[in-house]
Amino acid sequence: MRSITERGVFSHQPQEYGQSVLGKALEFWPAAEETDVLLVGGIHGEEPDTTVLLSRALRSLRHQSARAAVITAANPDGITRGTRGNANGVDLNRNFSTADWQPEPITHRWSFEHDSTVQLSPGSAPASEPEITALTALITRLQPKRIVSLHGHLDCIEDPAGSKFGRWAAEHSGLPLVESVGYATPGSMGTWAAEQGIPIITWEFAPHSIEAMFATQLPALVEVLKGSYDR
């Protein structure tokens, strides 16, 4: 582990795997050896805590993770603009090329206090967005043994398979383990990964401040990067 004073910058540099709608680099930090796990944050721009916590986990390590690859911001345009969707107004987590992709607008809550919903597009077609075509190409190239998709703020670890890794993540994050978040997610990364035969869990942070989550989520993410988890 690096000292606190060293953690302002990364110990190693990312690689570019594509570009966003607005031409921002899509970056990932590769594993030094084979990719056992791929962690993906920031696919929703309104969930910047996933990006910050993954970044801090990476910057805590003195050396490159041996078996974990990391994408801190799969939707850099959304992160920059503070929008859930990308620069085209597409919810990237409904744009994957899956058997259940649907063309109808999708909705999300404006806040936990509001019943009214915000509409976004799932894209003009499956995998219409450059962020998704680049991400799926990267996953195909890396062939990770599992994917961890980080989101907020449903306060759970979703693992339909009930895997050892999912149970480990729930225990070490303090989040409850569930088989499903309780609603359909057509065109999502979870559905796409399942169709590709890649185990995936969705790590849903609680609706707390980033600072409050440093004590609970950051140590667990660091352990994943170090490879200290049940396979």
Image (cartoon, helix red, strand yellow):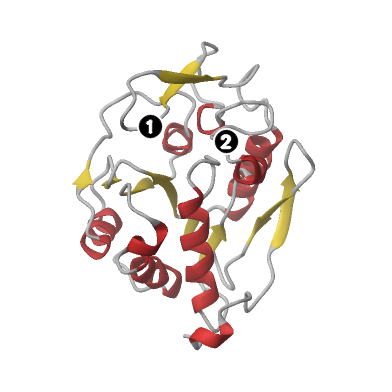
Q: Nearer the viewer, residue 69 or 88?
A: 88
Determine which of the numbered discs, if any, sits on residue 83 in the image.
Answer: 2
Residue 153 sits above or below residue 109 on the image: below
Residue 43 place in picture, x, y as percent:
54, 42
Whether residue 56 is visible: yes
Dot 2 falls on a residue whose secondary structure is loop
Closer-to-camera residue (198/215): 215
2 or 1: tag closer to the N-terminus:
2
Q: Is residue 100 visible?
A: no
Q: Position of 11 compared to 189: left or right? A: right
For mark 1, what is the residue? 111
Name the image quarter holding the C terminus. bottom left
Q: Residue drawn 56% across and 79% down?
A: 7
Residue 64 pos. (x, y %): 57, 76
Outermost residue to the top: 104
Q: 34 or 204, which lies in front?
A: 204
Q: Position of residue 114 (x, y in %)?
A: 34, 25
Q: Residue at x 33, y 62 (%)?
A: 212
**Residue appearing at x 55%, y 62% in the figure:** 69
| Kind of residue at badge 2 | Thr
Q: Is residue 25 left or right of residue 81?
A: right
Please state which amino acid type lies under the numbered disc 1. Answer: Ser
Q: Quadrant of residue 179?
A: top left
Mark 1 element type: loop
Please report the residue visible at 55 percent of the width from the left and 60 percent of the height from the top.
70
* Residue reaching furthest to the right: 23
- Residue 76, image x and y in percent? 65, 46
- Left or right of 155 on screen, residue 210: right
Q: Which mark is residue 73?
A: none
Quadrant position of residue 225? bottom left
Neighbor class of circle 1 (other Cα within 10 Å; few <14, some 14-19, many 20+) is few
98 lies left or right of 30? left
